[in-house]
Image: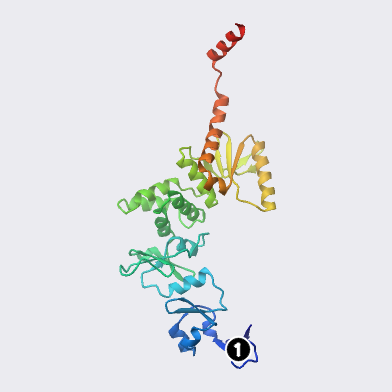
Amino acid sequence: MAVLTGDVVRLGRPIDSGSVQVPAALRKVPFTCAEAIEVGVTRAQLRGACYRRLGSGLYHWIGLRESPQLLLSAVARRLPPGAAFSGRTAAWLHGLDMTPCDPIEVTIPDPIGTRRRAGVSVGRTALAFEEIVIRRAMPVTSALRTVVDLAGRNPLTEGVVAADMFLYARLVSMVELHTYVAEHPGVKGIARLRRVVCLAEPKAESAMETRLRILLVLAGLPRPEVQVSICDDQGRFLGRPDLLYSKQRLAIEYDGGSHRDRMVDDNRRQNGLVGAGLRLLRFTAADVYGTPDLVALQVRRGLVGPLLAAKPPDEDRDRRHRHGRLA
């Protein structure tokens, strides 16, 4: 049991004179061994049950809940000048829904050392002054630099996912991305970035929506429109499908909801779209990840169907059919 008394947290029973006291200075953030000694905690106590080791020379009080913020703040204390969190870690610190600590990614200018240690993946490159910003009191690669870094990775789809997320959050703009590509023609990975920018879509509302869209494009299908509002003849809003082939009147939805309220909303939207004369295909994560070829095939058939239906009749074929029946 933990009992708060003044400037210390007393672990154990309150009347136990042998219980361990945790100084207030060590309760809120990770700390070094030297900082612990300064407030009266011994090395032996640091090895005890009240503290947990985060890394080389870093500890935290066990009453401090572990979180990405806690782990990153511990790593940040050991970053050299000119270093910053980067990649997916930087994206999380910018407020996007990405996994920040698997692994923790940092970029440092120092060419000495290993590329990975204690759960930290280290990139080696010099960052310009404007490429480092402060987020949550920690150095982070700027939004533009983070998109550039993530766009250069495999697979291509995940680079587009990152670009879409930053664009939708208005952390970067298409103008900034196009300008960067134009001003850095010889930079390593610029061809990949150019393709990511070409495929990026600021209106995409989710990562899975992007993955579904890029699946179709990479399968050779036409690029669909994104988040187009559909209204009836009186201008009343009927729905906004994730993806749309307006000419073929084919709407495509990523189905990621599981709660009843979400299902009710989706059903109402589906009814509105069908009522407007659209055909609707719905896909789940299992479809996108497990059977991408089948997804592409179903959409391809959906696109071809209306064209076949609108094709004028083959008069020669009809004439042969009539002659056969007469014979």
- Measured as percent of width and height from the top left, residue 177 is found at 41, 52
Q: Which residue is mark 1?
A: 6
Front residue of 185 and 20: 20
**From this viewpoint, which residue is outermost toward the bottom?**
17
Q: Which residue lies at the image location 64% right of the left edge and 88% below the top edge?
A: 13
Q: Which residue lies at the image location 43% right of the left edge and 79% below the top edge?
A: 57
Q: Give SS at disc 1.
A: loop
Front residue of 211 and 166: 211
Q: Which residue lies at the image location 54% right of the left edge and 72% below the top edge?
A: 66
Mark 1 nearby-residue class (10 Å; few <14, some 14–19, many ≥20): few
- Look at the picture and state if 316 lies above or below 212: above
- Look at the picture and state if 150 lies above or below 274: below
* Residue 320 seen in the figure: yes
* Residue 247 seen in the figure: no
Q: From the image, which quarter does the N terminus lie in?
A: bottom right
- Look at the picture and state if 75 lies above or below 311: below
Say what amino acid the circle numbered 1 marks: Gly
Q: Which residue lies at the image location 57% right of the left edge and 29% below the top edge?
A: 306
- Measured as percent of width and height from the top left, residue 81 is found at 36, 72
Counting every numbered tag in the picture gives: 1
Scheme of colours in the image = rainbow
- Measured as percent of width and height from the top left, residue 266 is found at 66, 46
Q: From the image, which quarter does the C terminus lie in?
A: top right
- Measured as percent of width and height from the top left, residue 24 is found at 55, 85
